[in-house]
Amino acid sequence: MGYDSHISFTLDTICPWYKRTKFDNSEDKVQKYTKLMSNYGSEAGIDFDFHGTVANALDAHRLIQHYQEELGPEAADKIVDSLYAQYFTLRAHPSASETLLNAATAAGIDKTRAKAFIDDEHEGLQETKMLLREQASNGVDSVNDDHPD
């Protein structure tokens, strides 16, 4: 016997379109959400700061995807953890080279090697866009693959 279900999954590395879609572009809803998340964070010892720069995070997705393929999910998890910590507690720009490099080195990736990848903005870009489009075609919301900023 089957049943209908709906699973929502967010692969969101600080996506600038999230506010528009998740909260109907309502500042009141965003404020309620940030207050709730701040309370949750406080209970876990995290001092969230929701005032960082909102920007295209495609390069963060590219970094995560590249090292997940090359080094496995553990490396990708460490990169994501660092990106979130930098963005949500330090107001780091989500796709700045320095932010990405800090995330890569936090995952144990050699700084010179990581910098070479980050500086080559074309490496892995098409593969990442293809994977994001593939997931979008499966009904999964994803980062816009344009660079508006």
Image (tube, grey):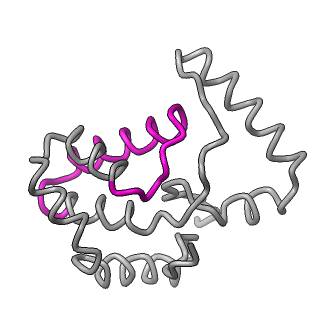
Query: In the image, residue 111 lies at what x, y percent?
Result: 13, 48
Residue at 20%, 58% in the rendered image: 67
What residue is rendered at 85% in x and 47% in y?
29
Looking at the picture, does residue 24 appear above or below residue 87? below
| Residue 39 among those drawn in magenta | no
Q: Is residue 48 left or right of residue 113?
A: right
Asked which quadrant contains residue 78, the reply is: top left
Residue 134 seen from this side: yes
The residue segment tinted magenta is 69-97
**Left or right position of 73 against 52:** left
- Left/right placement of residue 36 relative to residue 51 reads right
In x, y percent, where is residue 34? 73, 36
Q: Residue 37 is drawn in which quadrant?
A: top right
Task: Give the side of residue 34 with respect to residue 59, left or right.
Answer: right
- x then y, percent, for residue 77: 30, 44
Q: Nearer the viewer, residue 138 or 86?
A: 86
Q: Quadrant of residue 8?
A: bottom right
| Residue name at image x 38 percent, y 66 percent | 59
Main SS, magenta region, reads helix
- In the foreground, 75 or 121: 121
Res. 138 in view: no
